[in-house]
Image (cartoon, grey):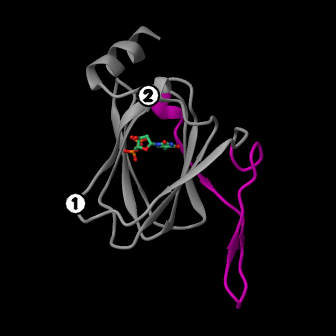
Amino acid sequence: MQLELCRIIELPKIADPRGNLTFVEGERQVPFAVRRVYYLYDVPGGASRGGHAHRELEQFIVAMSGSFDVVLDDGYGQRTISLNRSYYGLYLPTMVWRELTNFSSGSVCLVLASTLYEAADYIRDYDQFVREARAA
Ligand code: TYD
């Protein structure tokens, strides 16, 4: 179901001896208009982030630096994707429970989001998520 829509997108990489450059454009490399950007950094060893799903929000997650794992669950199955390159990103559609784990030291997680922050869009209870996912 939704897990099949989760996919790695390879971003353009302009290699240059002065340093590489990668860019992301809304509705081009990512399939939505970008309305918000946030990032996770200074994540302590052993910490995990996420642990929720979104009803309307789509996201695109990039390991800008270092690496981490994204554990995905659509209420029917699970899949884990490791991100460790600045020119790959993970597209997440609506209604995917996600947990970010195994952050390497100094890693930075960039998230592009399709909507502004909206607390009501979160599903923070896993059983509630499974009920909604299976009712869809
Ligand atoms: P949350 O989305 O739960 O973080 P994570 O998914 O990494 O575990 O957000 C943590 C806190 O930050 C929560 O109080 C809401 C706030 N927040 C905003 O105010 N705006 C935002 O764009 C985001 C992503 C979070």
Q: Which residue is mark 2?
A: 122
- Tell me which corner region of the image, top left, top right, bottom left or bottom right, holds residue 12: bottom right
- Tell me which corner region of the image, top left, top right, bottom left or bottom right, holds residue 51: top left
Q: Which residue is rendered at x = 74% and y = 46% of the image? A: 26
Q: In the figure, 13 relative to 81: above or below?
A: below
Residue 96 is left or right of residue 115, and the answer is: left
Q: In the figure, 14 relative to 63: above or below?
A: below
Residue 78 is left or right of residue 112, and the answer is: left
Residue 110, position in %: x, y? 53, 57
Q: Which residue is rendered at x = 47% and y = 29% of the image? A: 119
Give the amino acid type for the residue marked by disc 2 in the picture.
Tyr
Who is closer to the viewer here, 133 or 42? 42
Who is closer to the viewer here, 44 or 103? 44
Q: Residue furthest bottom?
A: 17
Q: Which residue is rendered at x = 29% and y = 25% of the image? A: 125
Numbered circle sitting on residue 135: none
Q: SS at mark 2? A: strand
Q: Is residue 31 in view from this perspective?
A: yes
Residue 101 belongs to magenta span: no
Q: Residue furthest left?
A: 46
Numbered circle sitting on residue 46: 1
The residue range painted magenta reads 1-30
